[in-house]
Image (tube, helix red, strand yellow):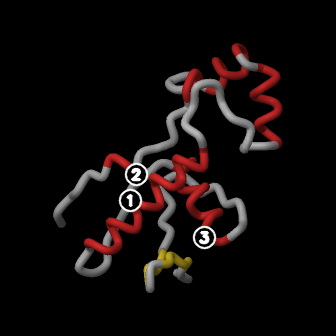
Amino acid sequence: MPVTILPDLREMYAGEWDGLTFDEIRKRYPDLYAARFHDLTIPLPGAEDHREGLARFAAAMEDAATAAPGDFAVVAHGGIIAQFMQAITGTWYKPAYTEIILLQFKDGTFTTQEV
């Protein structure tokens, strides 16, 4: 199966938190870390805006779906997938590692599909 790398399917840029472990983040930013546990919309210092990241990812997903001659697979990080799934379903959903999520793309819209 041919592989195409779409840079816009990358994970959100986490700014000052990028590359740090959760333990390092908790130690360096204890108040912000605790606050984000309850509200993921609180921005990270120097990070990509979540709305802009979602728009970037969604556009790349639409490009992939439009270009594919049939079924296709996308491999991406959980954070951006969670935001994309929330945009589709209206419900926050954090996928498990290596989880497979089936989507349908029809008339310019993604919807979830039962397995």
Q: CA distance from mark 2 to mark 1?
A: 6 Å
Q: Which residue shows up at 60% across the image and 50% down it?
A: 51
Q: CA distance from mark 3 to mark 2?
A: 16 Å
Instruction: Say whether residue 34 is left or right of residue 17.
Output: right
Amino acid type at circle 1 is Ala
Amino acid type at circle 3 is Ile
Say what secondary structure mark 2 lies in.
helix
What is the x, y in percent for residue 99?
Answer: 51, 61
Amino acid type at circle 2 is Leu
Q: Would you identify the image quadrant in which residue 26 lies?
A: top right
In this view, 47 is above or below 86: above
Please tell me which of labels 1 and 3 falls first in the chain: 1
Q: Which residue shows up at 82% across the image and 42% down it?
A: 38
Q: Which residue is mark 3?
A: 88
Q: Nearer the viewer, residue 82 or 7?
A: 7
Please tell me which of labels 2 and 1 falls first in the chain: 2
Q: Which residue shows up at 23% across the image and 79% down it?
A: 69
What is the x, y in percent for residue 112?
Answer: 55, 77
Q: Which residue is mark 1?
A: 60
Q: Would you identify the image quadrant in which residue 86 lies?
A: bottom right
